Image (cartoon, rainbow, N blue to C red):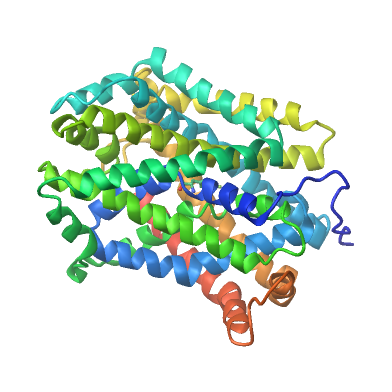
Amino acid sequence: CPEMAFPSPEREQWSSRLGFVLAAAGSAIGLGNIWRFPFKAGDNGGGAFVLIYLACLLLLCVPYLFAELALGRNSKRNPVGAIRAIRGHSLWSLVGGLCVVTGLAIFSYYAVVAGWAVGYVFRDLTAAGASGAAFAQFIADPLWVVPLFGGFLVATAGVVAQGVRRGIERWAKILMPVLFVLLCLIAFRAVTLPGAGAGLEFYLTPDFSQVSGLMVVEALGQAFFSLSLGMGTMITYGSYLPDDENLVVAGGYVAVFDTLIALMAGLMIFPAVFAMGQNPAEGPSLVFVVLPDVFGAMPLGSFVGTLFFLFLAIAAFTSGISLLEVFVSYLVDETAWSRRTAAWGAGGVAFVIGLPSALSQGAVPALSDLSWLVGDRLLGPAPGVLDVVDFLWGSVALVLSAALLSVFVGWVWDADDALDELRTGDGHAMGRWVGPVWRAAIKYAFPATILTVLVVDLLYGVL
Ligand code: PFF
C-alpha cells in the first residue's frame, strides 16, 4: 500500500518564495546557459535555433517542470521517496533511483568542466591567437585539473552540508545577484564593440532554411538540460516548498530567469565573436578557446575575461550544488546518515567517479581515446571518457528518466491529482482552460516527444 506522504518533522523548507526562486534559478542557470546554449545556437545557425528553443521550452519543458515541482511538494521527499510515497514499494522506485544516480554522475563530470572555468579565473589564457593550444595544455595538466576539480567538489559539498536554508538558499541569495551584475557588465562591453552588429543580426534574425529535425531535437535537449529537468532536481527543490506556495508562479519565475540568462549569454558572446572576426560555429570550444581569443584582442580584454570566467564559475557552482543535493536528500531521507556525513560522502564518491573524466583530456591517453574499449564510431573520432559519460548520463539517462517520470505523473500518480497539487497554494493557478491542456501535455505530448528525442539521440550518438 502507498506510504503516507508526511514530511519528516525536521524537514527544512525555503524561507520564502524568493529563496526558492533564487536557489532553483541557480540550479537552472549554469554551464548549460553560458557554455552549451551559445555553442549550440552557433552551430545551428543562430536565430532559428533560438526560436525553436523557446518553443520547446514553453510547450514542453515548462509544463514538465510543474510536474516535477508538484511531485516533490506533494510528497515532501527526494525522488525515490516521492515515488514510494505515491506508489509504495514497486518497480517505479527504480525511476527515482535513476534520477538520483544520474544526478551524482552528471555532478562528477560537471565539476570537471566547472574546475576549468575556475582555473580560467586565475590563469590568463587570453594570449591572442594561441588560446587553442593553451587550453589543450591546461586541461591535459593533472596538476591543475585535479586540484580544481577536487576544490570545486569540496566547496559544493561544504554548502550542501550546511543545509537547505543556511547553505543552499543563503549562497544563492549572495551569488545570484553577483551573477546578474557580471552578466550585464560583460554584455554591455560586448554589444558596444565596433562591429558587434553582425553578431546581433546572426543571433536575432532567424534563418529558417537552417531548420532540421536534428536541430529540433538539439533544441529540446538543451531546453531540458538548462531547466535542470529529468533528474529529480526540481522534485527535490520542490519538496522544500511550503503548501501555500503557488507552484505555477514560483516555477514560472525560474523558467523566466533561466531563459533570460541564456538569451543574454548569447547577447554577450555573439557580438564579441563577430566583432573580433571569429567563427560562431566552433562547437564546445566556443567559450574556452574562441572567447579567450576575443578577450585577448579587445580593449580591457584580460579584465573582462576574468570577469567572464568568474561568472561562469559562479553559475556552475549553484548548479553543482543542486546536482549534489539530489543525492544528499536521498541519503538524508532514506538512511540514518546526517546531512553533513551524506554531503561529504556523496562528494567523495563524485570525486572517485569523476576522476577518469578529469584525466581524460590528455593526462591519461587511454582515457582520452576509448577506441580500445568501445571500438571506432561510424561517424566522427573515437570518444574519450568525458564524451561518453556526458552522452550516457547528460543525454540518454536524463531524457529517459524524464520520459518515465512524466508517465509516472500522468498515469500512475494520475494527472488529475498532480493538477490538484498545482492548484493548491495561494492565488490562482491552472484555471479552466490551462489545466486540461497541461493534463494532456503531461499524459500524451510529453512522453511521446521525449521518447522520440531519446531514439534520435541514441541513433545519433551511437552512429
Ligand atoms: N541546468 C544546469 C545548466 O544549465 O548548466 C545543469 C543541470 C543542473 C542539469 C542540475 C541538471 C540538473 F539537475
Where 296 sits versus 187, above or below? above
In depth, the one of 223 and 463 nearer the eye is: 223
* Side of 90 relative to 208 (left or right): right
* Side of 364 relative to 186 (left or right): right
* Side of 127 relative to 252 (left or right): left
Quarter occupied by the N terminus: bottom right
Location of residue 152 in the rendering, given as x and y in whole percent from the top left corner: 51, 26
Location of residue 204 in the rendering, given as x and y in whole percent from the top left corner: 23, 63
- Quadrant of residue 243 within the rendered picture: bottom right
In depth, the one of 438 and 246 nearer the eye is: 246
* Side of 283 relative to 54 (left or right): left
- Quadrant of residue 135 within the rendered picture: top left
Residue visible at 82% across and 36% down in the picture: 335
Where 442 sits versus 142, above or below? below
Residue visible at 87% across and 56% down in the picture: 6
Location of residue 416 in the rendering, given as x and y in whole percent from the top left corner: 72, 77
- Quadrant of residue 203 within the rendered picture: bottom left
In depth, the one of 25 and 56 nearer the eye is: 25
* Residue 39 appears in view: no
Residue visible at 81% across and 57% down in the picture: 85
